[in-house]
Amino acid sequence: MSTTAIDLRTRALPAPAVPERTHLATVIRFPVERVRPAAPPAAPARAGALLPAAAHVKVALAKAALFLVVLALVMGASWHLGLSLQPQVERTVAVVVQPGQTLWELAASAAQPGQDVRDVMAQIVQLNGLQTQAVLAGQELVVPQY
């Protein structure tokens, strides 16, 4: 028969945590191993981040210059084609300004119902090449006829 030795020595076990009372709840604290979180992944580089600051300024100026060139081309084309925001006058009539008569009164008499008198005044000024809206008695004006 063989005898086997049994180690009857006891190992020291960790002492149980002592409950701690706070208010109405019992809190038992257990030892916790702290785990360091993994580093966040690197953010992808922006497409334009590789350019120096001076290059960004040059690109912005180039875009602004391109916008101004396109705007000038559009404005020039509309001027060349004779496009305007005011309706074109097909017929005109010559009128002699009476004493006490104003440009507003002339425009109001020429305007259609519902038409803005200020627009008609602008057309009279444009048709006659007036520098101001002042008119003199006896002055002959070209007035649009609608």
Image (tube, helix red, strand yellow):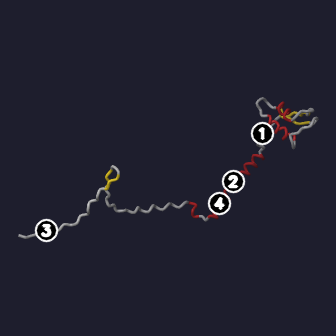
Which image quarter holds the N terminus?
bottom left
Q: Residue at x 78, y 29 (%)?
A: 113
Location of residue 82 (image quadrant): top right
- Can you see residue 129? no
Dot 4 alpha-carbon crowd within 10 angstroms: few under 14, some 14 to 19, many 20 or more? few
Residue 142 on image: x %, y %: 88, 36
Q: Which residue has dot 3 on it? A: 6
Q: Are marks 1 and 3 in contact (CB under 8 Å)?
A: no
Q: Which residue has dot 4 on it? A: 59
Q: Which residue has dot 1 on it? A: 86
| Amino acid at the residue labelled 1 | Gln
Secondary structure of the residue carrying tag 4 is: helix
Dot 3 alpha-carbon crowd within 10 angstroms: few under 14, some 14 to 19, many 20 or more? few
Residue 120 on image: x %, y %: 81, 36
| Amino acid at the residue labelled 2 | Phe
Q: Which badge, 1 or 2, comes first in the chain's sequence?
A: 2
Secondary structure of the residue carrying tag 3 is: loop
| Amino acid at the residue labelled 3 | Ile
Q: Residue at x 18, y 66 (%)?
A: 10
Q: Are marks 1 and 4 in contact (CB under 8 Å)?
A: no
Q: Where 114 falls versus 74 (above or below)? A: above
Q: Are marks 4 and 3 in contact (CB under 8 Å)?
A: no
Secondary structure of the residue carrying tag 1 is: loop
Q: Which badge, 4 or 3, comes first in the chain's sequence?
A: 3
Q: Which residue has dot 2 on it? A: 67
Spatial distance from mark 2 to mark 3, Cα to Cα? 93 Å
